Amino acid sequence: MRDNRSQTMSAETTNIRRACTADAPELSVLAMRSKACWGYSREFMEACRAALTYDESYLEQHEVYVLESSQRIIGFYSLEPLPDATLELGALFVEPGDIGKGYGRLLVEHALEKAKDAGASRIEIQGDPNARGFYLAMGATLAGECESRSIPGRMLPLFHVPVDRE
């Protein structure tokens, strides 16, 4: 399966670049579309809207990178500083039709490179429960649970990924 993903990506030209403030509306819509692919209810999605809104201020204050293919944004991630030489993967979203093609892996690998360049020792991820398998496959370890920022009482898996994985 991994070979098929590589072939899919090699047939297309992809580029990862720093997001600009003009990308903010598109990133927010992409995040909502990507989150909704897990089958969440309309009420749940509305409760998440504020947390999945990436405005110009957010893009100016955090490192946000977009993955483009054929001039189209197909995914993005953000890094947010935490104490103790840790960065949080504040966002990681891929267009629903492009999930499973290796783009999420590209974004995580890019995030790990950026974190290493910044001197971070690890990346922390508050992941959607549906993405557990993806993060574990990326080398993350389950470090516990944390409460959702959007849905009080909802617990999310908390992952740690060491930046220097060699």
Image (spheres, rainbow, N blue to C red):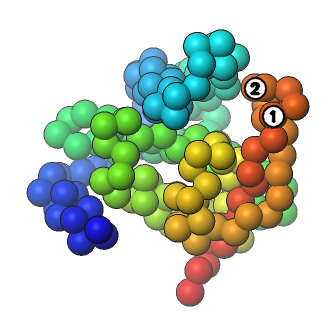
Identified by mark 1, the residue type is Arg
Number of residue marks: 2
Kindly indicate whether the residue at mark 2 contacts the one at mark 1 (C-beta within 8 angstroms). yes
The location of residue 72, given as percent across then percent down, is 25, 33
The location of residue 127, given as percent across then percent down, is 66, 47
**Left or right of 136 on screen, residue 82:** right
Q: Identify the residue at image location x=75%, y=26%.
A: 150
Q: Identify the residue at image location x=46%, y=31%.
A: 37
Per the image, the residue denoted by label 1 is 154
Between marks 1 and 2, how big is the CA–CA gap?
Answer: 8 Å
Q: Identify the residue at image location x=52%, y=34%.
A: 38
The location of residue 2, given as percent across then percent down, is 30, 70
Q: Secondary structure at mark 1?
A: loop
Quadrant assignment, res 117: bottom right
The location of residue 130, given as percent across then percent down, is 59, 45
Per the image, the residue denoted by label 2 is 150
* 10 Å crowding of disc 2: few (<14), some (14-19), many (20+): some
Q: Is residue 34 above or below residue 11?
A: above
Q: Nearer the viewer, residue 135 or 76?
A: 135
Quarter of the figure with the N terminus: bottom left
Identified by mark 2, the residue type is Ser
